[in-house]
Amino acid sequence: MNSTHNPGYPSHRFERQIPLIGPDGQKNLEDATVLIAGAGGLGSPAATYLALAGIGELIIVDDDIIQESNLNRQFLHAAGSVGLQKVYSAEATIHGLAPDTSIIAHSIRIDENSADRLVKDADIVIDALDNYESRFILHESAWNADVAFIHGAIEGFSGQLTSIIPGSSPCLSCLITAVPPSAKVPVIGATAGVIGSMQALEAIKYLTKSGTMISGRLLIWDGLSGRTEFLKIGKRNNCPVCEEGKDRK
């Protein structure tokens, strides 16, 4: 935890959540730095609810600009923001909602040159990416740095989520053994809201040591049928990321 944050929150701002997480849990949130990888459909609810919960610092990373087709789900961005960089629109929106949360905005692509540097200051990573190549690179950097990684992905009316805790759960490469082909997928905005909110909740649970993480399990949510199921994630033999004895960077 980064103990340098000294947010000046109003005394009653968190009175509805402190009975659930305790004063120490609230302080953990205020001392935490969360990396939000992606300021789009998943990043919008994840960043918003983490800031509203009192996270001390958010690092938001996205190299994209806002397009009109984003607006059915990416509520960090207003209609008048089309054409602007997503990270700066997100920074302005979150500052208006939670002015005591520090925002560090990086309009850069997550790749092998940037991932380690981005992860090193974070207590936890929210995977709100729609690009599996960047997702795998960021995940490996987080794993090597012993930083928890909350994976989420959506398509249509459905989504999935798992929390990857280095040293105690299988990794993303155990779950997804090859990078899927890049494609623009259809999505209902509310689907992004459900999964992104659950990613925020997993981060809050992790930072406050509350409840049971969705770790070693993949949550699959089907919005059309209203069904949720869990699949056990097994360790992959000879996994290139998490195999025992693998040298970390």
Image: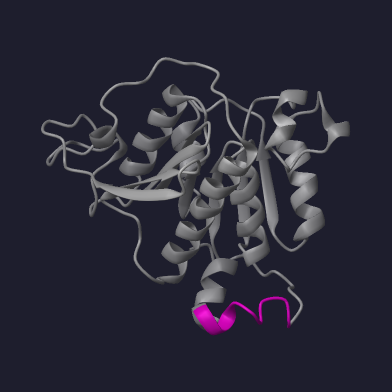
Residue 112 location (% of width, % of height): 43, 24
Q: Is residue 30 left or right of residue 150?
A: right
Specify the color scheme. Answer: one colour
Specify the farthest residue to the front.
Answer: 225
Region of the chain picked out in magenta, as a range: 12-20
Picture residue at 41% right of the left edge, 72% below the top:
210
Residue 42 location (% of width, % of height): 57, 41
- The residue closer to the viewer here, 3 or 132, is 132
Q: Is residue 147 visible?
A: no
Residue 126 location (% of width, % of height): 50, 46
Picture residue at 66% right of the left edge, 77% below the top:
14
Q: Quadrant of residue 23?
A: bottom right
Picture residue at 62% right of the left edge, 62% below the top:
56
Q: Residue 18: within the magenta?
A: yes
Q: Quadrant of residue 236?
A: top left
Q: Where 27 sits versus 47, above or below?
A: below
Q: Is residue 234 left or right of residue 2?
A: left
Residue 108 location (% of width, % of height): 61, 27
Q: Where 93 sits versus 28, above or below?
A: above
Q: Quadrant of the C terminus?
A: top left
| Secondary structure character of the magenta stretch overall | loop
Picture residue at 38% right of the left edge, 29% below the top:
136
Q: Is residue 243 visible?
A: yes
- The residue closer to the viewer here, 36 or 176, is 176
